[in-house]
Image (cartoon, grey):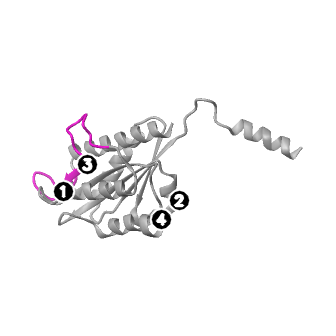
């Protein structure tokens, strides 16, 4: 009787043929001033704009191994400090490789960066994070050729004419999230 009941429950909760699994994208950021965090939430908006995808936004301090395992896509965000990835983000990347010994071969990746000035090294930070992903076997979902050929999203936060992240830069973040979500969704089928 118990076995019959378990079989009925399994049948009722089993996915219907052709039904897709939800695609999960983890957005991991480090932010001291709030600019990179603001960008992370714009990336999440882009992810959520793709039907059948879910976005989880977490700071590097809050991410656990299970978050990485569950994710179909991982998007990293860091401020640029003299053209370098922020130390907490670098430690996070090292942790998934050395401590967790977690190969991420089946994950799709992307990156974004905030920086204070035009020559703050934001592109170098994006490329550094993408290289770390590629070295871990991830698939990179950029560049965003359909827009303007960038490898990720960046912002210039402390230079006139504005302070913080402007709407143009947030639009880049949404496009990045959408791109990673679309590629992860295709690979998740």
Number of marks in picture:
4
Residue under pointer 1: 157
Alpha carbons under labels 1 and 4: distance apart: 35 Å
Over which residues does the magenta segment extend?
142-165
Sequence-wise first label, 3 or 2: 2
Sequence-wise first label, 2 or 1: 2
Cβ–Cβ under 8 Å for marks 1 and 4: no
Cβ–Cβ under 8 Å for marks 4 and 2: no
Q: Residues within 10 Å of mark 2 (few under 14, many from 20)?
A: few
SS of the residue under disc 1: loop
Image quarter of residue 86? bottom left
Relative horizontal placement of residue 92, taking residue 144 as reference (left or right): right
- Magenta run includes residue 4: no
Residue under pointer 4: 101
Q: Which mark is residue 153?
A: 3
The N terminus: image quadrant: top right
């Amino acid at each position: 009787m118990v076995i019959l009941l378990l079989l009925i429950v399994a049948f009722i909760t089993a996915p219907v043929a052709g039904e897709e699994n939800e695609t999960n994208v983890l957005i991991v950021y480090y932010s001291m001033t709030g600019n990179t965090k603001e960008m992370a939430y714009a990336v999440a908006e882009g992810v959520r704009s793709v039907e059948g995808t879910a976005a989880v936004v977490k700071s590097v301090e809050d991410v656990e191994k299970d978050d990485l395992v569950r994710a179909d896509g991982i998007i990293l965000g860091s401020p640029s400090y003299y053209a370098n990835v922020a130390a907490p983000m670098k430690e996070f990347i090292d942790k998934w490789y050395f401590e967790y010994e977690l190969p991420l071969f089946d994950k799709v990746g992307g990156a974004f960066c905030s920086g204070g000035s035009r020559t703050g090294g934001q592109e170098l930070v994006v490329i550094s994070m993408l290289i770390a992903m590629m070295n871990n076997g991830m698939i990179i979902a950029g560049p965003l050729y359909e827009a303007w050929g960038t490898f990720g999203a960046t912002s210039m936060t402390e230079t006139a004419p504005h302070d913080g992240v402007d709407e143009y830069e947030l639009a880049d973040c949404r496009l990045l999230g959408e791109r990673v979500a679309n590629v992860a969704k295709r690979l998740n089928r």
